Image (cartoon, grey):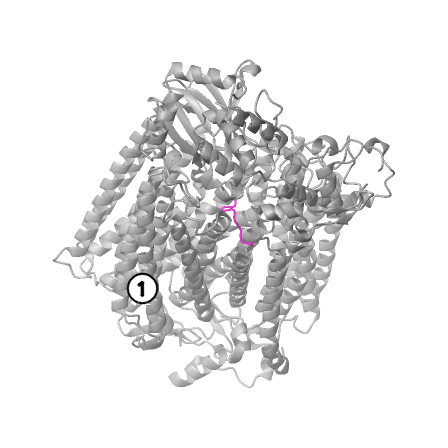
Amino acid sequence: MVEQRLSVIADTDLDRAGLERELEKTWGAQPGFWGMIATVDHKVIARRYIVTAFVFLILGGLLALAMRLQLAQPEARFINPDRYNQIFTMHGSNMMFLFAVPVMEAMAVYLVPLMVGTRNIAFPRLNAFSYWVFLAGGILLWLAFLLDAAPDVGWFAYVPLAGPEYGAGKRADIWAQMITFTELSALAIAVEIVVTVFTQRAPGMSLDRIPLLVWAMLVMAFLVIMAMPAIMFASSTLIMDRLVGTQFYNPAEGGDALLWQHVFWFFGHPEVYIIFLPAVGMVSTILPTFVQRPVFGYLPLVMALIATGILSFGLWVHHMFVVGLPRLGESFFTASSMAIAVPAGIQIFCWLATLWAGRPVFKVPMLFIIGFIITFVIGGLTGVMVASVPFDTQVHDTYFVVAHFHYVLIGGAVYPLLAAIYYWFPKMTGRMMSEILGRWAFWLIFIGFHLTFFPMHILGLQGMPRRIYTYQPELPWGGLNLFVSLSSVMLAAGFLVFFIDAVRSCVHGPKAGENPWNAPTLEWATSSPPPSYNFRSIPVVEDRNPLWSRPGELTVAAGLRTDRRELLVTSVVEALPHARESSAPQSVWPFWAAIATSIMLIWSMFSAWAVVWGSMPIAIALIGWFWPKGAPEEES
Amino acid sequence: MKRTLLLLPVILSGCAGVQSALDAQGQSAILLRNLIFVIVIVCSIVWLAVMAMLFWALLRRDRPKPEDSRTDKPMQTAVIAAVAATVVIITGLTVASFYTTRGLGPVPDVDVTIRVRAQQWWWQFTYEDREPVHAFQTANEIHIPVGKNVRVLLESIDVIHSFWVPSLAGKQDLIPGRENVLTLRAEKPGFYRGQCAEFCGLQHSHMAFVVIAEDEQNYRQWEATQRATPSEPREAEALAGKAVFMARQCSACHTIRGTQATGISGPDLTHVGSRMTIGAGLMENSRGSLAAWIADPQTLKPGNSMPLVPLSAQELRQISAYMESLK
Amino acid sequence: MSASVSRNSSIMLPAILLILFALTAALIAYLREPRQYRTDPPVSEALEGMRLMPNGIAGTPPDVYFALGKPYEKTAYDLSQGKRLYTWFGCAECHGEGEGGKGPSFLDGWWLYGPSMVSIAASIRDGRPHGMPAFGSRITIDEIWQLSGYVKTIGAYSASVNAPARNDDRQTRPAENRAPAASLFDEGPVPVHPDQGPSP
Amino acid sequence: MKERVALDVSHLPLHATGTASPTWWGTCAFMLIEASGFSLAIAVYFYLMSLAPIWPIDVPPPDLRAGTVLTALLVASVVPNMLVSRWARQRNMWRVRVGLVVMSVTGIVPLVFRAYEFPALHVLWDDNAYGSITWTILGLHTTHILTDLVDTLVLTCLMFSRHGDNARRYGDVEDNCLYWNFVVITWLPIYACLYWVPRL
C-alpha cells in the first residue's frame, strides 16, 4: 500500500505554516456530528470528561444541599426516609465514582500527553470508549434516581442490607452495575496513562525529569490497576448473589458478611489515594510556577508518592475497626494507617520549603493551594485520629468521620483541582479566568467550607451518627446542624461563582498567550489551546524544567512524517527514541463497542444470559475496531 | 420506679451529654475520652506549628534569588527534622492507642450478661440466667448496676447494626452470623442514650435505646419486677384493652408473659409500661404517646414493621390503658 | 465505513441514541417501585372487599386493588415484605419453605383453590377446610395481600425479576426469582399428594 | 517560541517492536489487571476456606481427571505457542499461519475438558459458598481462554487475508502468544488451589 501513495511527507520538507497545515490535515477531527462521535483526540475527550464530571459535581452538590435542608431542624419532614437514603447513597456514589475519580483521570488524559511532549495518548480509541462507558454509567444512575429506583444502601453497599434478602428491587443492582461502568472506564484510562508515560515521553525526558504531576498520575494509574479489580469482583459477586443465588455473603451457607467489607475496602482505601495523589501532583506542579523557583525535594516527593501508593494497600482494615476483629490485626493496621502520615508529612514540608525559598505570587491558583495546605493538614491530622483503634470506636460512623473525609476530599483534592482549573484553563480554552471572581470564589469556598464542616467534628463527638435522616428535638444537635446548613449555602455560593466565572471566561475571558504564568513544563510550549497535533515538532528535553532553562527556545526533534499520525516511541528509563510509531486514527467503533457494553451490563441486571448473548455484539464491535482499514497508520 | 419517672423530663429535655463521647461516665468511655483529649491536643499543636511555618514561609521578607542554592542545605536539615518529628509523634500516638486498647480488654468477673439481638429497627435485650426460667426479655431499654461489669453479647438477626452508648463505651458492630462481646461498666448512676451507628436501612435514624445505671439495690428490685409476670390490670378500661389486644392483630407479633399473646416478631411487651420510651427511643412513654403510636405507627416511623391496625377510638383508648398498666 | 453510510448515520445516530435512552428509561420505569409503607385505612377497608365464587375457587378482587396498580404481585418491595411475613407468621410450620408438610406444597405448581391472588388472600384471611386456620384476626389485610403476592411467586410458572432472591439462610430450594416451581414442575406430572392433605 | 532542531528521527523504524511497542506494554498492563483479579479471587477462596469447619463444604474434593488433563494440555500448548511467537519474530508468514491454526485448535480443546470440570466439582454455584467461589474462579478463567481463543481466531483470519504480511500483525501475534502464556500461567495456581488444596 505504501507504493500506492504519491509521496511520503516528512516535516523537514516543509516551512512552519505548511507543516501546521499538513499536521492539521492529518490530525484534525472530521467536521459534523459523526466526527464528534468518532474523535480520538485526547484533549477533546478530556474536555468532555471534565465537563461531564463537573456536571455530576453540581448534581451531587444539589443533593448535599437537599440533605442539609432536611437536617437543618429536628424531625423535619422535607424528605422522607426512603428518598433520603437514596439521596445520601447517590451523593456518595456520584461524588466518588462519577466526579472525583473521573475528573482526576480526565485531567491526566488532558495533561499527561502534553506534559510528556507527545501528540496523543496511547490507545486513543480505548480513551474514546472509556468516555462513552463512563457517560452510560452516569446516565444509568441518574435515570434510576429520577425514577425512584436509585440505590438506597449507601455508597459502600454493605451486605446483607444490599444483599438479596434486604435489598428488594433493582436498586442495589443499579449501584453495582454503575460501579462496573465507571471501573471499566477508569481501568482503560489507567492503562493508557501507564503506557503513555512508559513509552511516549519526549526524547531526553528520563525518569528523573518527569514532571511531578505525571509521576502522580502514573502512581494513581497503578493504584487503579491494582485496586479496581477488587471492586469489580465485589460488585459482580453482589449481583450474582442477588440474581443467580450464589452464597458469597450468606453466613448460613459458608459465606460471610465481612468478606464484603474486606473486598470493598481493599479497593476503597486506595480509592482515596486515587483521588488524592493526582491532587498532590497538581500542587507540586502549580506551586513552583507561583514562587518562580523549582520545587524543593523532587526525589523525596517522588518517593513519597510511591510510598503512599504502596502503603495505601495496607490499611483497609481501619474502616472496620468496630466489627470485632482480632486485637493483633487491629494494632498492625493502626500502625500502618499512622505510618502513611509520614509520606504526607514529607510532601507538606517540601512544599513549605519551596514556598519559603521562593517569591510567592498570590494569584487565584496560589490561593487555592494555600487553602489546600491549611485545610488538608487538618484532614490529615483527623485521619491520624481515626487511625487509632480506641479513638475510632467513639467516632466511627459519626459526623466526625463525615467532617474528616470532607476535609481530605474537598480540602485535599477539590481545592487543588480548582487551582488546577484556574491554572490550566488558559491552556485548555485559550482564555484567562477572572482574577476578581476567582478571589470571590476562593474566599466563599474557603470560609464556607470550614464553617460547614468544622462543626461536624463536634457533632460527631457529641454522638451524632452518620446517615440519619433526622434526629429528635431532645438531642443537643439542633443548633449546630442549623449553623452547618446555613454555612453550606455559602459554600454552594462559592461554587456558583466559580461556575459563573468558568462559563463567562470561556467566551469573554482575555486571550492567554502560550505561557501566561511563565511556567516551566512542556504543556506551555505550544499554543493555547493546543492544536490537534499538540506540538508542531516533538520537543527534546534536556532539563527538569525545560521552559526555564532556555527561555524563548525549544529544542525539538525533526524527521517525523506528517501524512500519517506519527509520534515518537522512547525507552522507559532514559527516554531514548526507539521508533516512529503511528497513533490510531479516529473511529466510531469505540462508540458502538461502548453501546454494546452498556446494553450487556444493563441487561445483565435482569438475566445472567445477558453475559452470553450480550457479549456477541461486543465481540463484533471489537473486531470492527481492530480490523485493518488500509490507513497509512497501519504501515510499518 | 418513681425515681425513674421523676428523672424522665430531665433526659427528655435534652440535658447535654445524653449521648456524647465527651460526657464519659463509664470506665471505658473515660479511658477513651482521655485518649481523645491527648490526641486532639497533640494534633492541634502540630497544626499550629505547621501553620506558623506556612505563614512564615509566605510572609518573610529578604528572599534569595531563585538560582541561589545556599538555602538548600538549611532547608534540607529543616525538612529532615520535621519528618523526624512526625515519625516521633506518630509513634507516640500509636503507643498511646495501643495501651488504651489494652486497658479496654475483656474482664474476667462479670455480674450481668445481656444478650442483644438487633433488628430493623429496634433492640431486643435478653437478661440471661443460668436457669432459663429466670431469663427475661425487654426492648430498647436496659438497666445495669453501677460499678459492675456487664457483659453484652451482640448479635444481629437481619442486617449489620452497631451498638453504641458513647457515654459508657465505644461502639461495636452486630453482624449476622457472628457474635461480638462488649463490656459496659457505668461509674455513675444515670440515663445514657445509645443509638445504632451502622446504617441499617430505612429507619436507621430511629433505632435508639436507653441504658439506665442504678445502684445495686434498685437494680435488683427492677430485675425482680421484670422477671415477674404482670398482674391482671385493675382498671376496667385496661382490662377491656387486654381483651382487644388478645382478639386483634397485636398478639400475633407481641408477647405478654402470662397471657395467650406469644408473637415473637415484635418487642416483648410484658412490662412495656415501665419503659421510658417507645418506638426505639422515638417518643417518651405515656398513655397519649402509646395511643398515637398504635393509631398510626407508619406516619411516626415510616417503614417500620408495625402495621396500621384499624381500631376504633374506644379500642385505642383501652389498649393504651392496658399498655400503660403493664408496669 | 464509507462516506454515504456515514452521512446517513449522522441522521440515524441521534435517533438510535434517543431510542436507546428511552428504552432504558422505559425499562427502569416499568420496574420502578413506589414503596408504600402506610396503607390508608379506607384503602385497607376496601382491600377487604374480595368476592369469592361459591366453591371458594377464584373470584374478583376489590376494585381498589386494580386502582392501586396490583402492587402486591408486582413491586419487589411488597413481595419481599411478604417473604418476611411468611417467616414471622409461621407459615413455614405447615408449608415448609414451599415444599409443604402438614399443609400443601406451593412448589409443585398445584393450586388446590386456583392460583389467583384473590383465592390465596381469601385462604389466608378466612382459612380453608382440613386445617388451614383463618388469619384474618391475626394479620392486617394489607399484610395478607403482601403475603399472597409472595406465596404466588413461590409456585409461579415463570420466573419474575421482581421476585425476591434467596434469603441469608440455609437453602432448601432454588430462589423464587429463579422460578423453583417451574423447574420442579417441569420434572414431570406430580401425583396428588395424599400426605399434603385432601383436595377440596 | 524559537525551535532548535536537536535530534533527527527520520532514520527510525516506522513501527516499534517487542518491548518497545506500546501494544506490548498495554498487554502487560491488562495482564496486571487480570492478575490482580485472579489473586483476589484466590485470596477470597482461602478466606472462605478459613471460615469453614470442613473444606470443601459438604462435598468430596473435585475429581482430578478433567482438570489434570486440561492442565497437561495447557502446559503442552506452551510449546507450539512459543514456536508461533518465534516464527512471528522471524516474520515467517507460512509458519505463523500454520501455527495459528494449531493454536486455534489448542484453544478449543481445553474448552471441551473445561465443560467436564464444572460437574467434576460435585457442587453447584448456588449450593454454598464453596460452590460459588469455585464456579466463579473457573468461570473467570474460562472467559480468559475464550477471549484469547476469539483473538486467535480473528488473527488467523487476518493472517490469511491481504492484511497479513505486516510487521504490526506479527507484533499482534507475539502479543497474543504472550497473553496465552499468561492464561496458562494463571491456571497453574488455580489448578493447585481448586484441586489440591481441598486434598491437603
D15 drawn magenta: no
In this figure, which residue is indicated by the disc labeled 1?
A543
Residue B257 in view (yes/no): yes
Query: Does residue A188 sit above or below B231 in this rendering?
Result: below
Prevalent SS, magenta region: loop
Give the percent coordinates (x, y) of residue B199: 48, 41
Residue at image coords 68%, 47%: D75
In this orientation, which residue lies closer to the viewer: B290 or B279?
B290
Q: Is residue A417 left or right of residue B135?
A: left
Type of residue at label 1?
Asp
In this orientation, which residue lies closer to the viewer: A581 or A426?
A426
Q: Is residue D118 left or right of residue A267?
A: right
Q: Is residue D47 left or right of residue A430?
A: right
Residue D89 in view (yes/no): no
Give the percent coordinates (x, y) of residue A135: 52, 63
The residue lying furthest to the left in this view is: B62
Give the percent coordinates (x, y) of residue D88: 63, 63
In this orientation, which residue lies closer to the viewer: D105 or B228?
B228
A156 drawn magenta: yes
Query: Does residue A462 sit above or below D13 in this rendering?
Result: above
Q: Quadrant for residue C112, please give it.
A: top right
Question: Which quadrant would the C terminus of chain A be assigned to in this image?
Answer: bottom right
| Secondary element at tag 1 | loop
- How many numbered discs sit on the rendered protein? 1
Query: Does residue B30 sit above or below D68 in this rendering?
Result: above
Q: Residues within 10 Å of mark 1 (few under 14, many from 20)?
A: some
In this orientation, which residue lies closer to the viewer: B326 or A117?
B326
Q: Chain of mark 1?
A: A
Give the percent coordinates (x, y) of residue A624: 64, 69
Question: Which quadrant would the N terminus of chain A be assigned to in this image?
Answer: bottom right
Magenta segment boundaries in residue numbering: A149-158
